[in-house]
Amino acid sequence: MKTVFARNSILAVIVLAVLLLAACSGPKAQVAQLPEGLASAMVPDMPLDGYLFARQSQPITVPGAFAGLPFDPAIQSVEAWLVPSDSTEAVGAVVTLAAQRDAEALLAMFPRRDDLWTQLAGSNIFLVWGSGSGADNLKKAIQARQFVSFGEADKNAWEMLQRLPGPPATKPLAVAFVRMEDRVIRFFQKNSRGNSDQGMASALQLSKVKIAAAAFYSNKPLQAADLLSPAGLKDAGIGGIVIAKSSYPGFVISAALGPAASRLNVQKTEVDGRTAYYAAAGAPNGGKVHIYFGNSGSYVYAEGSADLARTQELHRWMWGSK
């Protein structure tokens, strides 16, 4: 019951964030702080509905004890691709490790499934999950090494990522984008684990969000142990920024904002003299996620973390406060 309530709380906050799109034009794109190697990262030469790129300043080590190994495999980067596949989506990924020995050991940990295709290539593990034409095309592109530079392949997604904060923000450990096409919504609905997840997908569909981008930050290089507990995530300063663009005109959103804010009891506040909206959403682990919202034109920005001070820092990064 607590988990459902927590998810519904987060859903309510996300819906309100979309309703904060009040003006007519968005801010200009900037030179954002992005992970090293993103501009030259290679993606399959095919249309993408989503992309995740994760790389930090040092590899993440996976405790070898999990698989009875005498060493700890080290992950250098992870990339994932969401591609159209008939009426739904297929997912591909590449996990790059420090050495082929590490890749072989990590691949042995993956479950054997009929809908999961894998290929080892040196220190890279390629994966494809799903079925249909998109999954088949992903496999063909991987086998033939048909890749193109992400920075050149998807100009719209690249422009969205450039709206993430620049200095003094630190480089994020991961960035992502997703296009909220109908088939993507159906994919999320089909693979959701509960009614609240399906409600979130439906809310995004109703809000007419067409594309969203996100960045995830930490105050230190992460290791596997940091990801295994809520305390570890908080101590690492994990936080995120999400940007979404709606096709609704600003005057429609502003007309709905007042009643929605009143119903959801979201606080209107100030950070460094700038108006902001604040909400504390319940997290599945029993804690809170502190979230600030702001908007410029048809772009809405949300910053969140389990630590209020960290959320305020992310908000300052987003809005340029010194």
Image (cartoon, rainbow, N blue to C red):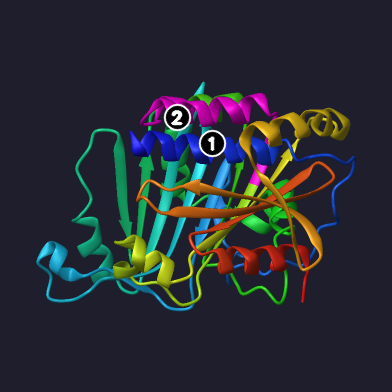
Q: Which mark is residue 196?
A: 2
Which span of residues is magenta-colored? 187-212
**Do the numbered discs 1 and 2 sit on residues whose CB atoms are within 8 Å?**
yes
Q: Nearer the viewer, residue 216 or 150?
A: 216
Residue indicated by mark 1? 11
> Residue at coordinates 31% horizontally, 67% vertically from top-left?
224
> Residue at coordinates 26% horizontally, 68% vertically from top-left?
62
Q: Name the spot of residue 4 as percent of width and height, x first.
A: 39, 34
Query: Which corner quadrant holds the N terminus?
Result: top left
Q: Amino acid at mark 1?
A: Leu
Q: Nearer the viewer, residue 312 or 207?
A: 312
Q: Quadrant of residue 116?
A: top left
> Which mark sits nearer the N-terminus, 1 or 2?
1
Identify the main secondary structure in magenta: helix
Measured in 3D between alpha carbons, the distance from the residue under mark 1 to the one under mark 2, in whole angstroms, is 8 Å
Q: Name the spot of residue 152 as percent of width and height, x first.
A: 70, 55
> Residue at coordinates 15% horizontally, 63% vertically from top-left?
66
Q: Name the spot of residue 292 as percent of width and height, x first.
A: 65, 54
- Left or right: 104 in relation to 129: left
